[in-house]
Amino acid sequence: MRLSPKLLCATASLLWVFLASSCGFNNSIVSLEYRPPAHKTSGPRVVGAGRFADLRHQGDYNLGTVHSPIGTTMETLSTHVPVENIVRNGFARGLAARGMLSPLNGAPYLVTGEIYRMEVNQFVHPTAAVRMRVNLVHAEDGHIVFSRVFEGYRQGDAYLPGTGSPVSAMTDLMSHALQDVIDQALDSHGFHSKMGRAEAPSSPRY
C-alpha cells in the first residue's frame, strides 16, 4: 500500500516529536554575523558604540525556540554572550564599515538603544524579528539628538521534519533581521543630519 505525501509528512512529524520528547530538547549556542552591505552611507568618524539595554524579558542569552508542528519545544537557541553585547558589537561593525566609528573615550557622539524584541522561532516557517529604539547621544552632556524605533523581520521556507536541524537557517535569519535594523539606523537621513558639524577627535579625551 502506498502512503500519501500528507500522511508521510504527518508520520515524520509525529516521529520527530516522539524522539525529542523521549530525549529532552537541546540548547544550541549560536553566533550572529554582520556583513557590511555593498551600498552604505559613510560619515565622519565621530560616533562610539554605547550601551544597548535588553528590555526583552526573556533572558540575557536567549534567542528563541524550535517548535514541532504541534507546538512542542524541540530545541532552544542561545548566544555565547549577552544579546545586548551582540547588538552593540553589530553597531560597532556597522559604524566601522562606514568610516564612522570613534573610540569611546574620544567620541563626540554615542549610539545607544533599547532592545524591545529580538527573537527567532519556528513552528512551520522559521521567523526572526527585531525591534529596537536607536539613539544618537551627545557624549558630553547626554543629550539625545536623534531617537527612532527600527524593525527587521525575516521568514524562511517551511521546515520539513526529517531534513536535518533548522538551527543554521534560523541563525542566518536572525543575523539578517538584526543587520536590517543596524543598516536602517546607520543609513537613515535623520541619524546623519543630527551629527551637525562635529569632526573626528584628533586625540582621545581622558
Image: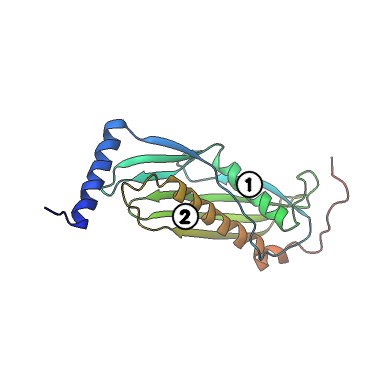
Outermost residue on the left side: it is 1
Residue occupying the point 21% across, 57% down: 5
Q: Residues within 10 Å of mark 1 (few under 14, many from 20)?
A: many
Residue, far front: 1
Residue 16, given in percent of the width and then of the height, sits at: 28, 42
Q: Which mark is residue 88?
A: 1
Q: Is residue 96 visible?
A: yes
- Residue on which the image places disc 2: 129
Disc 2 packing (10 Å; few <14; some 14–19; many ≥20):
many
Across and down, in percent, residue 155 comes to: 43, 58
Q: Relative to 116, is 139 on the left or the right? A: right
Q: Is residue 100 left or right of residue 94?
A: right
Q: How is the image coloured?
A: rainbow
Q: Is residue 158 left or right of residue 43?
A: left
Coordinates of residue 47 in the picture (x, y in percent): 74, 53
Residue at image position (18%, 53%) is 7
Q: Amino acid at mark 2?
A: Ala
Q: Earlier in the sequence, mark 1 or mark 2?
A: 1
Q: Nearer the viewer, residue 74 or 200?
A: 74
Residue at 66% x, 60% y is 186
Looking at the picture, which amino acid does disc 1 mark? Arg
Disc 1 on helix, strand or loop? helix
